[in-house]
Image (tube, helix red, strand yellow):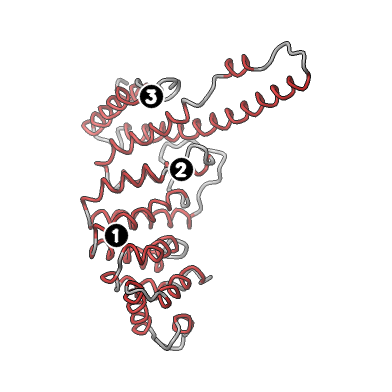
Amino acid sequence: MTTSLGGLLADVSGNRDDEILKFALQGLERKAAGDGQAYQEIVEALDRLKDPQSPVGLINALARCTGSLRLKPHKALISSVLNRGWSGDEPLAAAAELFAVNAVSVNAPDMLGPCLSALVAQFSVHRAAPLPHQVASSAPAPSHEELQRAQRVHRAIRRVLETVPTGAMTFMELLSHSFPHRRKEVAVQTCFMTNAVAVLDYFPHLLKPILSLLIDKLIRIDVEIVPVEALDDDVPGEVFDMEEEEEAGGAASKEQQENALRVEKLDAMFMLMLSFLHTLFSSSSSSSAGGDAAFGVLLQIFDTDVLTTFRSKFTQFVIFYACGFKYH
């Protein structure tokens, strides 16, 4: 390869698509054979280009080379394409989507997990549309561009799972693994949670595992919340050593702050869950049979997850809220 990839991508005077395709194909094949120079140039080009639309031609070329993709040698490239693919407009997203679909079409056993993992990772980045009955929050509403990017990520996930219908279990495993840790900021938690709920718009059969996952995340924060009365009891009373009293008081104050953050997270996630249930059980969006099935799923989760969890104090009110719709 005598022409550099940078030169091909920078040349706007003519159509260099065939040359870019040749470079991409040879780069993948040589990397698999142990020569990673051209491959590294491809990965660096994806990460380095400042214009979000610049990688479109390169990603379209890579989408035509998916037969040469191998998981171990090309993992970094797969991640670069599917992380970069949602930062621009529709042509870039369409190219990234085509790359993912072609990759799983050619080699589902190896490519399904990495492609879905990179797509699910976007759930913490791009906010989906608010739920119809969602209570307003202090966070600014997502912009039109942000909503479009989230929609494109979901469109890609839908096409990947339609291409490989047996991939639903893999998707749920990745959704659970990628869910933000409970110590992450509330905005990250609610962003991911809203996107998880949005999956049910096109894959309603995942209602039970997604509901179970969301309630599990509520419980994990719930059990760490300390009632205010218990915190007050921990504040030192009559202490003779002033330094020890200050240290104990400082520790109590820190615990109160951390507890307040946990309460804030649970409150925001709780309101999202209630908004979701409102939408799920409202007569305009769910048939009677669908509502009965959803209520049955909630009862199963209540029996297996909520009732059996020590120190769960608030999560059961999700079920009580659903009962209000069921027996209204």
**Which residue occupies 65% across, 29% down?**
254
Query: Residue extending furthest top?
Result: 238
Cα distance in 3D space between marks 2 and 3: 25 Å
Q: Position of residue 74 (x, y in %)?
A: 36, 66
* Foreground tag (3 vs 1): 1
Going 27% across and 41% down the picture, which residue do you hit? 206
Q: Which residue is mark 3?
A: 321
Which badge, 1 or 2, is on the more N-terminal residue?
1
Tag 3: amino acid: Tyr
Secondary structure found at label 3: helix
Instruction: Say above or below: 166 vs 34.
Output: above
Disc 2 marks which residue? 180
Task: Name the front one of labels 2 and 3.
Answer: 2
Quadrant in the picture for the N terminus: bottom left
Check disc 1 and report the residue beneath it. Answer: 111
Residue 175 at what x, y percent from top left? 36, 45
Q: Position of residue 47 (x, y in %)?
A: 49, 68
Q: Is residue 2 above or below residue 169?
A: below
In the image, is residue 129 above or below residue 222? below
Task: Looking at the picture, tell me which residue is in the foreground, 155 or 114.
Answer: 114
Q: Residue 301 lies in what quarter of the image?
A: top left
Q: Residue at x 38, y 71 (%)?
A: 59
Q: Residues within 10 Å of mark 2 (few under 14, many from 20)?
A: many
Q: Secondary structure at mark 2?
A: loop
Q: Viewer-nearest of labels 1 and 2?
A: 1
